[in-house]
Amino acid sequence: METIRIEDAKNYVGQEVRLGAWLRNKRGSGKMQFLQLRDGTAFFQGVVVKANVGEDIFSKAKALTQETSMYLIGTIVADERSPFGYEMQIKDLTVVGESEGYPITPKEHGTEFLMDHRHLYLRHIQPFAVLRIRNTLIAATYEFFNKEGFIKIDSPLMTGSAPEGTTELFHTEYFDEDAYLSQTGQLYAEAGAMAFGRVFTFGPTFRAEKSKTRRHLTEFWMIEPEMAWMTQEDSLKVQERYIAYLIQAVLDRNEYELDLLGRDKDLLKSYTQLPYPRVSYDDAIKLLQDNDFDVQWGVDFGSPEETFLANHFAKPVFITNFPKAIKAFYMKRHPDRDDVVISADLLAPEGYGEIIGGSERDTDYDYLEKRIKEQGLDLNEYSWYLDLRKYGSVPHSGFGLGLERAVTWITGEEHIREAIPFPRTMNRLWP
């Protein structure tokens, strides 16, 4: 007898098979029990008919409790009424692991409760669907950059410097020297780009900001490509192709999970249509002011402004050339203006905000040295970075995408805790 997983049920219609599963929920009567089952690949129903299995098996089915694990033997049948399309007519069951007092009962639970029980919350439909989509995005990321001629390099998780200032970094000591949990792999990726042309890093990053907004985590995963011989406009084309590739991969591979989440697939499909609009920061400020936003040139956008701008265009939109004063030291100066840098943020519609931040990198040694000093950073910690401008520097650009923010947007989730149950938020540490 074949042992299968639920996702393979379509290949075994009419056949008797064996399945290992957990019980999500059940309902029934004195004659039938309907078992809602999961096995980590999908969810479907198993039906136990008393007349077909006898009193012993039927009594076992009636006594099952939420999250009991078991082996089931039965026949796979098509079921057009089921969202999954198939179910199992159960012939026999054997309890493997009993479950008593499972805390996440079939009712509404608040965020705090689910965060306290996220080691168990992983088993439920929402994180199941979200994390399978996240897995697709990870696989598609490697596929995309491999096809585009990039190689992956790994940047250190502890650094001696702060690429974007020291106020948001976790401080520690490394053999009696100051060290910080990595805020970004970008500077190391720039070194890699000077060696290989096109590289990307993909790893955890840390921000020690006590934010209570739904958009922020203190630990998240960042994809950071760096590209030699590329202008900012070249980079924007890579960025929009990358986003479209990610979304299409999810549409192709995760239809079931998108349906579980109730995500509008046609809306997602519209986000694959390129190119994305490009709007200068100057024009974005004017557009906001014309629509009664109280904003002045020189400020960074908050959530209301980002939401309006992206929804105004009904698709992802690049906001370009931000004021120099609110951006990192390494961004290239605009050739015609000293007050802005050649940069862009990609804003996602539906209120999800910035998905990508990037820029062309400045190549002027003296200017970068000055900017490092102006921001109060230790020049000695950046000597290796300045070396990249001394020995054959070339025009180059890069960007960073926060995976969890992208997951939250693509899945249509309202809160980042559904997108990734484990990483630490401001005050909810993994036990």
Image: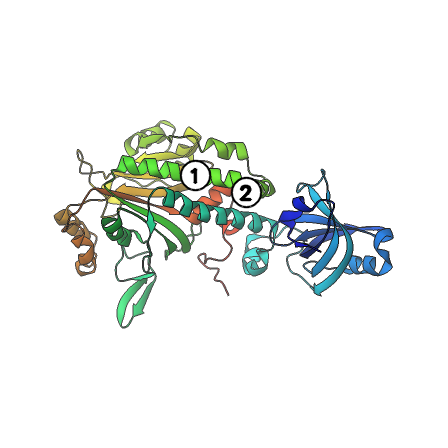
Q: Amino acid at mark 2?
A: Asn
Q: Residue at x 34, y 38 (%)?
A: 238
Q: Kindly give the residue lying farthest to the front in the view shown.
A: 1
- Give the percent coordinates (x, y) of residue 124: 61, 52
Relative to 178, say whether 401 is above or below.
above
Q: Residue at x 49, y 35 (%)?
A: 268
Left or right of 159, for residue 246: right
Give the number of callouts.
Answer: 2
Left or right of 32, for residue 217: left
| Near-viewer residue (17 or 270) | 17
Left or right of 315, for residue 388: left
Q: Amino acid at mark 1?
A: Tyr
Circle 2 residues within 10 Å: few <14, some 14–19, many ≥20: some
| Near-viewer residue (293 or 418) | 418
Relative to 312, say whether 26 is above or below.
below
| Near-viewer residue (220 or 22) | 22
How far apart marks 1 and 2 lie (CA) works out to 14 Å
Q: Residue at x 68, y 48 (%)?
A: 44
Please, what secondary structure does the residue beneath circle 2 have? loop
Q: Is tag 1's residue or tag 2's residue first in the polypeptide sequence?
A: 1
Relative to 12, say whether 71 is above or below.
below
- Give the percent coordinates (x, y) of residue 196: 26, 49
- Snapshot quadrant of residue 63: bottom right
Left or right of 395, for residue 5: right
Name the residue beneath numbered marker 2.
254
- Give the percent coordinates (x, y) of residue 61: 78, 57
Q: Is residue 321 visible?
A: no
Q: Residue at x 49, y 52 (%)?
A: 420
Colour setting: rainbow
Q: Which mark is residue 245?
A: 1
Relative to 342, say whether 383 is above or below.
below
